[in-house]
Image (tube, rainbow, N blue to C red):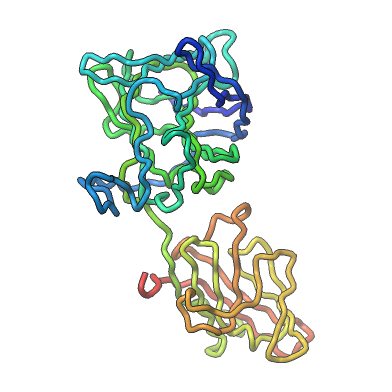
Amino acid sequence: MAPLSLKLIRSGIGVGLLFLNSQIIPLHAQPVIQLDSVEVAARQSRMLEQSLYPGNTEENDPNIYGFRALDVYKEGLSSEIWSSKTPCLRVSPLKDPDGAQGLALKWDKLAEGCPAWIGLGIGWDAWAPKNMEQVIHHAALNIRLKALEGQPKNIPVAFALEDYSGAQCWLGFKAKYLQKTGLNNSEWNELRLPLEDFEWERSQAQPAQIKQLIIQFEARGNMAIDEISWVPHAGNPPQMWHGRWVNEGGLNSMAPDHDVRFLVGKNGRDLLLLSPFDTLTAGTFTLSALPEQARIRRAGKLSDFVIQSDSPFIKRSVTTAADGFAPGIPCLRITLPPDRHPGLLRNQPYYLSFQADPQTSSHAIIWGAIQAHDHAGQ
C-alpha cells in the first residue's frame, strides 16, 4: 500500500458528554488545529525493554520518573471515551475469543456523506491534567491491536495529545512503530509511539497540561484495540555540550587572544559565547545559527559594549553557576526562538565570524566552526 498523506481538516469535535440510556453523546465542539500533513519525519529511536519502570520505588505503584497516569485505556466503554457521532465510524465493545475486552473500531470515511473529520478521544485518568514534561524522552505510547478483517500493513490513522488550551501535538502512523510486521485477525500486535516523536516543536501544545489522547481516522479500516498504556522508552534526550570555535584559516584569522568558548544548554536553544567580546572594536558579529546578524557596538566605557540587533534573542550577560563555568565571566547569551529555529545540534557545522567596522584601525576577523564535546559532569 502506498504511504498515505493524512490531511487534517478543521472541524468540530465533541468533548462534552451527556448520558442518555447508557449512550455517550457529544455536546460541545472544540477546534482542531490545521496541519499540512500528519505524515511526519520522526526520528529513529531505540526501544528499551524493562521488567520494572525506571524511577519506580514501589512495585505496587508503577511510574516512569514520577509519571503515574500510565493506563490510558483498559477495557469497555466509559465516560473517558468519546467519538464522532456519524455512521461512518462505529465504536463498540469487543468480545474476542481469547477473552480480550477492548474496542472494535470500524470506519469508512470514503463513504458518501461522511464528515470532514472523524475520530475518538480518551481523557484518561478521569480527565485530570497530566504532566508529561519530564518523560518526553523516556516514555512511549503502547497500543495493543489487531485487524478484524484483512491483513493491512498500514493503518490510516493519526494520533494527537491535546492540552487544556486546545492545542494538539500530532504523530502519524508509520509501519516502523509496529513491533511485528503488519496486522491480521489471528494474533495481537503492538504499536509503540515514542512520546518524543510527536511534533512538539511544530505545535503549541504544553506537555505539562495534557488533557486527552485523540485518534483520527482516514480512508477505511476495521481493527480492535485491547489496551493502551505508557511504557518505558530509551529516547534521545538533548545533552548539554561545550567546546571552542576552531580556526578554519583565512585572512587575519582568529588570533590566540580571540579564542571563543561556548556552552549549549540541554534544550539546544540557549547558547553562551565567552570572550573576546569585551575586547572587540565595533563591528558585525555573525553566527550562522542565528536568524539574522547582530551588530556589536562599543558603549561609552571601554569595559562595556552594547548589542544592536533587530531580534531580542541575543544579549550581554555573565555566566552563572548553573552554566557550568565560573560565575561572572562576561558572555553573550543567545536564546534561539523556537518558532524560527530547530535548536543547535551537537557537532553540526555552525560558523562564527566578526568583522570590524571599516572606519576602525583594526580589521581583525574571527572565523571558525564549532568543535563540541560533552559538558563535564553531564
| Horizontal side of residue 173 vs 227, given as left or right | right
Q: Nearer the viewer, residue 98 or 369?
A: 98
Q: Which of 147 and 26 is in front in this view?
A: 26
**Residue 136: where, in percent of width, then height?**
42, 49
Which residue is drawn at the image coordinates 36% and 42% (left, top)? 140
| Horizontal side of residue 318 vs 73, given as left or right | right
Q: How many labels does the image show?
A: 0
Q: Which of the 4 image quadrants contains residue 223?
A: top left
| Horizontal side of residue 61 vs 354, given as left or right | left
**In which quadrant of the rendered image does the N terminus lie?**
top left
Height in image: 318 above or below 337?
Answer: below
Q: Which of 344 and 48 is in front in this view?
A: 48
Height in image: 141 above or below 108?
Answer: below
**Residue 372: where, in percent of width, then height?**
43, 71
Q: Which of the 4 image quadrants contains residue 367?
A: bottom right
Which residue is drawn at the image coordinates 45% and 77% (left, top)? 324
**Residue 32: where, in percent of width, then height?**
60, 31
Which residue is drawn at the image coordinates 20% and 18% (left, top)? 98
**Residue 295: where, in percent of width, then height?**
72, 74
Which residue is drawn at the image coordinates 61% and 34% (left, top)? 33
Height in image: 322 above or below 230?
Answer: below
**In which quadrant of the rendered image does the C terminus lie?**
bottom left
